[in-house]
Image (cartoon, grey):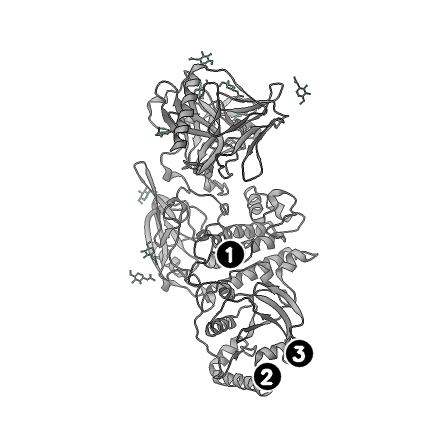
């Protein structure tokens, strides 16, 4: 309450003072500083520079002073930095830099002379904050780096863009941008969409095709009477009047003029629509909406997030989920929706139609290229999607049937289109499933269990198992008994011998040490893992779990050959992997594996995880996918190790655990939030590993040559967005198509929002080139 009245007081004083002495340009001198709630006003006191309230703190920017405390922010410094506290100060230092000092972090430079040191600053009446050199030449101005607004007299130069704010109260970068393209076209896109032609939701259509591209380079200029013009860079002539492309609001003030009492402002608003406003400075200060690019928020691509569509009711735009989907966050409906059912498996080329129903929506269309587009009848289209386990949705138009995978975006109404959506009946998978117990291989007296490699899993062995099941069981019991007769106390002793008293340590993992050993009179090399630091786990649960792991069989998983559990001793016997880990290969080797090799490894790992998630009896979440846990066998096949063990390290499986499992740099963001962990956490870690495979470097590399390259995941996105992918693999011979494919899949996998990440199955299909890969959004897109 106190702070509110202070604001009111200060602004009223400012306002009164403004009337008293107009148009006296006041210089901000070197050595001056500023704290909230004082500000540096423009001579007319219509604009001010300083701290304004944002969220729970303050941001630095320029605003239009309105009635009372109502301000219109037109520019924000370092807009994506977190708000500062009221203790922060702005200092115009002796060496001519404008710096922000806070209690917490290091000082940040807001502005410094680009063309020589500044010797004074002016908050100009045009809304431009300017640093001048001692010869009164401009060395920096806020007009050169617009955020979401241009003011009258301001230019958006060719190649520059406006980005909308996150929401009305938060001016950090939001979800849309308006780009003055160098081809002469002024275009709106959803943020981080890749800016393909199909992403554009509004444009002036002024791109040139002339012989001299420079003749079509325009700047966008807002003149003093509210005229938005495209100005030819070559001869500074007004070429196109953008106002003609805009929709009039029908407000009274549309006669564009300027009697010195009006300020024009064009802003890319939070909803992605570019609007022209006027602020009048007569006795009743009014704000008028004059023109806008689109009438309704629903007309903006991506206004509603993935898997949701928009309905317009008068001025209200509402987002709704597709059938079978729920809001990612019910309080932020523009964020999009996620499936509320699980995908049915799609193994062996068989369909999975039995698990789905088709929901039909008329007059609905969406963006993105389908992976399938053929002519057929409406009924055939419907059943074709139902029976195709890669199909999540189909669009029927005229006589063509287009099949698509989730997520769907840019959903909008369009007559004569029919959408078919597959809605599943399998409820979402439980967070941490417990393996079912179907095969029991045990003996009455056994404290020890072993699933030895005799259980070879060939096509024949399935048959053999069925026929000779009893026989094998007998052999097992006999062998075990023989061990006992030989004076062994049980397998721990046997393994102690096999590993030469745990002499040769291969490495140490999060669960304990791993030793090299031999079985079968030295014929078979094994790795023995001694589990330590485990939570107390019932003997029965442990065995059930190990048996489940023992039954997993996939060429990209390290095979568990046997285990024993006796009192506190827990030993796991794995096949021996002679070529070390993927980490050694990627980060340690002198010679990088070549590109095709890396492609193959990436797919190997993906298939291994896919098997864990979807193809073994009960889904297994690995929880710690990283290159150190991916081992290379004799033939350099990548195999995942340590799966199925995560739950033994967890304090309580029934609760949402927030203490981070996994390894820094690879763990999904949800580990740090209070949200349930799903298979998507592994997908995230896989995405990081995939990018590491692409670049042969660690996700976090403090020795990177530039600061922006330190974190690979954000560097990769930067390169992708700037179409500079080659920067990721400089000096290497790579296939650019597969490079783009891998990076796109990687970026999808590391989306902050788990629902946006593909399933492991989709990731494999994309890597194999079977399905199209939509353009990934920024992994950490801030959302409304
Ligand atoms: C503040 O200004 C905005 C327009 O910029 C207007 O919509 C709103 O009603 C104003 N609020 C008050 C309290 O005057
Ligand atoms: C300062 O404002 C005046 C009047 O609004 C304008 O003519 C001039 O161009 C502005 N200067 C800068 C550097 O923006
Ligand atoms: C402006 O500063 C430069 C050095 O920064 C100095 O050489 C020059 O003499 C100064 N000019 C005036 C007019 O003070
Ligand atoms: C821009 O100016 C150049 C040089 O005067 C001229 O050749 C060109 O045609 C102009 N472009 C357009 C689109 O008018
Ligand atoms: C501003 O632009 C509009 C549209 O091009 C034009 O009609 C008007 O004359 C311009 N105003 C000034 C002051 O140049
Ligand atoms: C607007 O202000 C300028 C100078 O600030 C002045 O020359 C001009 O006459 C004014 N126009 C009107 C209509 O008041
Ligand atoms: C999923 O959402 C649909 C509505 O789209 C609802 O009818 C269904 O009950 C939901 N299923 C689950 C498992 O929540
Ligand atoms: C499909 O719909 C029918 C009728 O509503 C229902 O009985 C059946 O369980 C549904 N099947 C699936 C797989 O959702
Ligand atoms: C939709 O179909 C009807 C009848 O076939 C046709 O008259 C109409 O023009 C179509 N609309 C569009 C937008 O194609």
Vertical placement of residue 12 versus 666, above or below:
above
Q: What element carries label 2?
A: loop
Which comes before the other along the chain, label 2 or label 1?
2
- Report if the beta carbon of the residue with label 2 is closer than 8 angstroms to ligand 7: no
Which residue, given by chain and number where applicable, does mark 2 sit on?
488
Label pair 2/1, CB-CB below 8 angstroms: no
Residue 152 percent location from the top left of the image: 46, 23
Closer to the N terminus: mark 1 or mark 3? 3
Label whose residue precedes the other's in the sequence (3 or 2) = 2
> Furthest residue to the bottom?
485
Instruction: Give residue 81's position: percent from left, percent from top.
Output: 51, 38
Residue at point 39%, 44% (across, down): 334
The verdict on label 1 being within 8 Å of ligand 7 is no
Give the residue furthest to the left: 314
**The label number, if any, that marks residue 163 in the structure image:** none
Seen at 65% across and 56% down, the residue is 587
> Where is mark 3, residue-wise?
522
Q: What element does badge 1 sit on?
A: loop
> Percent x, y for residue 668?
50, 54
What residue appears at the point 48 percent right and 24 percent down from the top-left corner? Answer: 127
Give ligand 6's quarter of the image.
top left
- Residue 743 in view in this figure: yes
Residue that protrudes farthest toward the right in the picture: 590
Compared with 175, 527 (above or below) is below
Please name the residue that numbered disc 1 is placed on: 660
Question: In which quadrant is the C terminus drawn?
Answer: top left
The answer to whether 14 appears left or right of 113 in the picture is left
């Amino acid at each position: 309450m106190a702070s509110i009245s202070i604001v009111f007081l200060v602004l009223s004083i400012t306002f009164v003072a403004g009337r008293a002495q107009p148009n006296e340009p006041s210089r901000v001198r070197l050595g001056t500083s500023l704290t909230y709630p004082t500000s540096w006003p423009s001579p007319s006191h219509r604009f001010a520079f300083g701290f304004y309230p944002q969220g729970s703190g303050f941001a630095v920017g320029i605003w239009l002073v309105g009635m009372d405390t109502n301000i219109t922010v037109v520019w924000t410094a370092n807009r994506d930095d977190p708000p500062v506290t009221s203790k922060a100060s702005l200092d115009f230092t002796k060496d001519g830099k404008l710096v922000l000092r806070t209690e917490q972090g290091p000082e940040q430079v807001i502005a410094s002379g680009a063309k020589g040191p500044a010797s004074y600053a002016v908050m100009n009446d045009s809304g431009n904050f300017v640093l001048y050199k001692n010869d009164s030449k401009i060395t920096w101005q806020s007009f050169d780096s617009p955020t979401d607004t241009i003011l009258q007299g301001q230019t958006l130069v060719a190649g520059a863009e406006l980005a909308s704010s996150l929401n009305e109260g938060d001016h950090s970068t939001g979800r849309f941008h308006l780009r003055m393209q160098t081809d002469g076209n002024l275009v709106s896109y959803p943020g981080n969409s890749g800016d393909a032609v199909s992403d554009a939701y509004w444009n002036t259509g002024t791109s040139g095709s002339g012989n001299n591209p420079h003749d079509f380079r325009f700047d966008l200029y807002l003149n003093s009477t509210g005229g938005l013009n495209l100005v030819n860079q070559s001869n500074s002539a007004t070429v196109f009047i953008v106002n003609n492309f805009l929709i009039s609001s029908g407000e009274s003030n549309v006669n564009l003029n300027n009697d010195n009492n009006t300020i024009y402002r064009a802003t890319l608003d939070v909803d992605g629509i570019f609007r022209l406003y006027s602020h009048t400075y007569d006795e009743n200060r009014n704000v008028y909406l004059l023109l806008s690019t689109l009438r309704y928020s629903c007309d903006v691509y991506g206004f509603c997030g993935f898997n949701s569509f928009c309905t317009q009711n008068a001025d209200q735009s509402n987002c709704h989920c597709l059938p079978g989907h729920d809001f990612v966050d019910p309080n932020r409906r523009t964020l999009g929706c996620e499936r509320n059912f699980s995908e049915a498996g799609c193994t062996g080329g068989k369909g999975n139609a039995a698990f789905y129903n088709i929901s039909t929506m008329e007059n609905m269309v969406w963006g993105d290229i389908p992976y399938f587009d053929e002519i057929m009848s409406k009924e055939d289209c419907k059943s074709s999607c139902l029976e195709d386990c890669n199909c999540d949705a189909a669009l029927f138009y005229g006589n063509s049937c287009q099949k698509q995978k989730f997520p769907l975006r840019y959903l909008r109404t369009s007559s004569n289109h029919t959408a078919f959506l597959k809605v599943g009946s399998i409820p979402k998978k439980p967070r941490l499933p417990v393996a079912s117990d179907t095969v029991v291989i045990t003996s009455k007296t056994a404290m020890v269990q072993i699933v030895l490699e005799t259980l070879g899993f060939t096509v024949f062995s399935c048959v053999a198992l069925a026929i000779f099941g009893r026989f094998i069981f007998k052999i097992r019991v006999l062998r075990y008994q023989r061990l006992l007769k030989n004076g062994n106390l049980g397998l721990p002793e046997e393994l102690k011998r096999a590993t030469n008293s745990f002499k040769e340590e291969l490495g140490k993992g999060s669960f304990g040490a791993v030793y090299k050993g031999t079985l079968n009179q030295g014929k078979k090399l094994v790795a023995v893992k001694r589990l330590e630091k485990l939570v107390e786990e019932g003997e029965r649960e442990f065995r059930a779990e190990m048996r489940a792991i023992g039954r997993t069989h996939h060429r990209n998983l390290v095979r568990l050959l046997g285990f024993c559990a006796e009192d506190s001793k827990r030993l796991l016997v794995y096949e021996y992997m002679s070529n070390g880990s993927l980490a050694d290969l990627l980060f340690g080797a002198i010679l990088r594996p070549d590109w095709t090799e890396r492609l193959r490894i990436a797919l190997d790992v993906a298939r291994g995880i896919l098997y864990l998630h979807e193809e073994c009896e009960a889904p297994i979440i690995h929880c710690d996918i990283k290159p150190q846990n991916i081992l290379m066998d004799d033939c350099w096949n990548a195999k995942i190790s340590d799966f199925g063990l995560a739950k033994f390290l967890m304090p309580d499986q029934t609760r949402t655990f927030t203490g981070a499992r996994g390894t820094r740099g690879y763990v999904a963001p949800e580990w740090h939030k209070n949200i349930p962990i799903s298979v998507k956490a592994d997908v995230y870690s896989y995405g990081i590993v995939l990018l590491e495979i692409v670049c042969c470097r660690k996700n976090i590399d403090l020795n990177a040559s530039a600061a922006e390259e330190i974190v690979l995941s954000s560097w990769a996105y930067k390169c992708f967005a700037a179409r500079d992918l080659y920067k990721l693999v400089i000096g290497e011979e790579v296939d650019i198509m597969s490079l783009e494919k891998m990076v796109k899949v990687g970026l999808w996998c590391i989306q902050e929002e788990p629902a946006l990440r593909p399933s492991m199955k989709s990731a494999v299909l994309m890597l194999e080139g079977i399905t199209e890969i939509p353009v990934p959004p920024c992994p950490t897109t801030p959302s409304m």
